[in-house]
């Protein structure tokens, strides 16, 4: 595993250095600067933030940073995403809803929020009950919100069985399309999309954007 | 292993343990002089938490309290064991789990962070952070919603201002159209009152006829103004009842034929011979038919024909009133149904018009769920046509 090098010049390395310091102000300036230059939100999320956060995970796994530093980096990122949110939300609404969630015992919510932001950019209303939602509570939440679609995110590979449990419950209770994705799938699990009806795996935000643009309701 | 055995075992590692303790970033070790309050030794962990003088850095319990605590009988036992806050009252401070010993003019403070507590607090802070982030997103979304609502409100206000302006125009026109005939009637009445002998009986009769016509016009206008005002306020409820439409057509044609006779105009009815029952407001529909027929007669030449035709078109009845009279100029057609619009073309026998009849007729038909439209060619005639939905026979 490559040690972290503060001398690299790429945008995501610069961003990575700032979030590990907990320097929210500078990280915000950096990201907003990229947005002002015309870099799309999708590209900022996919190429800068996601790359930096994956690297944060690797640094923690290789014991180069503490869990507290990992939390700080994530928290700074979430704050910056919130700053961008006002300009992300499309004023042209589609009258469509999506419920998004992480699986039980998962606290990583940056990925699922990126997905939520792409939906909001396309004019969908997004509903996120928070991280670590038990499967049966998720069912109740979906019943309450009556969405057109569900999106589920998994960050840790060992949580794939929990995703499958949630998928089974959702498809047993509702007739809804479900999209799945997340860092966990780097190591496997994509076959779940073939195993369950109306379930699609999204490899990245670009694929998600295309999917939303071409989406036609079932039947 | 018993404690004494442990100590014996660890004595082999005393040097390493000493170094680990002294260089630990988690274990605080400090030795103070109880006489002059100076710091005789402080490891790096302790020095990291210090703020101000060494003695001042012990906040709670304070240095002075610790040196006054009674010594236990066993000198190896601590004078104090528990939470000790170190740092500065005005800056960040830290609480450690401490043991304090005192002997021979010196005080030893050892302590470490309570890991259980730290882990719990970290979890709580992480949870609070997540909730704050989620709340921030929610508030942003609600702010956007509020902005959109304000925007809609602004547009609605602009629309209201336009409608208000139109209403004022309408009122001005109504007042103007009412005032003129009444003024004229008063003038004629004044002449008759003040100088009746200057005029022959026939002239006096003519004046009285004029007064009557003008007052009749004013009454008609006021009635229609009230009608249109009720319709606009949504206060008109159609009295939907099953009725024979053919009978209604025949009645309206007969009534208007009496007026049409003066211009030798024939009104021809083309509709089913047998009764045709469906649900509609009989009085209001008759009002529409009378208005359309009245207009057709006004704008037709003498010795001509006006046709009334009623046919079924899908789920509707289409009724057309067709004349071959003066027609409507093309640029006036879009405005024909607006209140107070008066055609530039004058009626063939000089008849008068309030300018409200078509506006009222359209409202009545639209209340039924139908539509009123016109096709016309200047100089060739007009066809006014309305549809009524073929409702099931239901009585209100």
Image (tube, coloured by chain):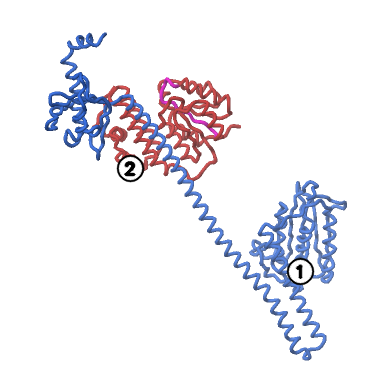
Q: Is residue B113 magenta?
A: no
Which chain is tinted red? A
Camera-side mark, 1 or 2: 2
Q: Give the residue pinned by disc 2.
A: A33
Quadrant of residue B113 within the rendered picture? top left
Instruction: Pinpoint residue B15: horizontal percent, then vertical percent.
Output: 15, 15
The residue sitting at 85% across, 63% down in the picture is B254
Q: Which mark is residue A214?
A: none
State the hue of chain B: blue
Residue A14 makes an appearance in the image? no
Placement of B217 over or under B195, stated as above or below: above
- The region drawn magenta spans A147-159
Q: Which mark is residue B298?
A: 1
Query: Which element carries disc 2, helix, strand or loop?
Result: helix
- The chain under label 1 reads B
Name the spot of residue B376 as percent of width and height, x first: 71, 61
């Amino acid at each position: 595993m490559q040690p972290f090098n503060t001398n690299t010049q790429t945008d995501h390395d610069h961003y990575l250095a700032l979030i590990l310091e907990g320097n929210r102000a500078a990280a915000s300036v950096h990201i907003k600067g990229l947005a002002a230059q015309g870099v799309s939100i999708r590209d900022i999320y996919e190429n800068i933030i996601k790359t930096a956060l994956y690297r944060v995970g690797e640094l923690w796994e290789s014991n180069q940073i503490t869990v507290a530093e990992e939390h700080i980096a994530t928290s700074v990122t979430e704050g910056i995403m919130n700053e961008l949110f006002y300009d992300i939300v499309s004023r042209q609404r589609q009258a469509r809803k999506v419920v998004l969630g992480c699986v039980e015992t998962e606290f990583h919510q940056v990925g699922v929020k990126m997905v939520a932001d792409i939906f909001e950019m396309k004019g969908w209303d997004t509903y996120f009950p928070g991280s670590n939602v038990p499967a049966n509570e998720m069912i109740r939440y979906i019943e309450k919100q009556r969405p057109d679609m569900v999106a589920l995110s998994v960050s840790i590979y060992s949580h794939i069985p929990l995703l499958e449990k949630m998928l089974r419950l959702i498809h047993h209770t509702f007739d809804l399309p479900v999209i799945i994705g997340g860092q966990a799938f780097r190591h496997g699990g994509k076959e779940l999309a073939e195993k369950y009806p109306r379930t699609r795996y999204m490899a990245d935000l670009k694929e998600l954007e295309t999917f939303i643009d071409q989406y036609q309701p079932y039947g | 292993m018993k404690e004494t055995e442990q100590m014996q075992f660890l004595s082999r590692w005393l040097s390493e343990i000493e170094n680990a303790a002294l260089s630990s970033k988690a274990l605080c070790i400090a030795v103070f002089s109880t006489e002059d309050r100076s710091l005789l030794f402080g490891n790096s962990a302790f020095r990291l938490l210090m703020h101000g003088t060494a003695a001042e850095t012990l906040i709670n319990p304070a240095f002075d309290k610790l040196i006054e605590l009674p010594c236990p009988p066993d000198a190896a036992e601590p004078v104090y064991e528990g939470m000790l806050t170190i740092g500065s009252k005005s800056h960040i401070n830290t609480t450690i789990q401490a043991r304090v010993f005192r002997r021979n003019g010196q005080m030893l403070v050892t302590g470490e962070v309570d890991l259980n507590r730290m882990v719990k607090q970290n979890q709580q802070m992480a949870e609070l952070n997540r909730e704050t982030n989620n709340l921030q997103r929610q508030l942003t979304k609600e702010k956007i919603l509020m902005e959109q609502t304000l925007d809609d409100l602004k547009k609605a206000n602009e629309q209201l201002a336009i409608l208000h302006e139109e209403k004022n125009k309408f009122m001005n026109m109504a007042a103007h159209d009412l005032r003129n005939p009444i003024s004229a009637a008063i003038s004629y009445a004044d002449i008759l009152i003040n100088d009746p002998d200057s005029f022959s009986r026939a002239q006096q009769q003519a004046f009285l006829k004029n007064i009557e016509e003008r007052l009749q016009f004013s009454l008609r206008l006021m009635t229609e103004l009230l009608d249109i005002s009720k319709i606009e306020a949504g206060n008109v409820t159609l009295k939907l009842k099953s009725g024979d439409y053919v009978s209604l057509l025949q009645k309206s044609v007969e009534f208007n034929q009496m007026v049409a006779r003066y211009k030798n105009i024939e009104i021809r009815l083309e509709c089913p011979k047998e009764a045709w029952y469906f649900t509609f407001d009989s009085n209001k529909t008759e009002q529409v038919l009378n208005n359309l027929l009245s207009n057709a007669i006004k704008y037709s030449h003498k010795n001509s024909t006006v046709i009334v035709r009623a046919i079924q078109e899908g789920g509707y009845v289409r009724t057309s009133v067709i004349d071959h009279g003066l027609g409507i100029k093309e640029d006036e057609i879009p405005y024909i149904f607006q209140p107070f619009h008066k055609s530039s073309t004058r009626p063939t026998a000089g008849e008068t018009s309030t300018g409200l009849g078509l506006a009222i007729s359209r409202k009545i038909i639209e209340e039924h769920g139908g539509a009123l439209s016109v096709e016309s060619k200047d100089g060739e005639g007009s066809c006014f046509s309305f549809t009524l939905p073929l409702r099931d026979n239901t009585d209100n």
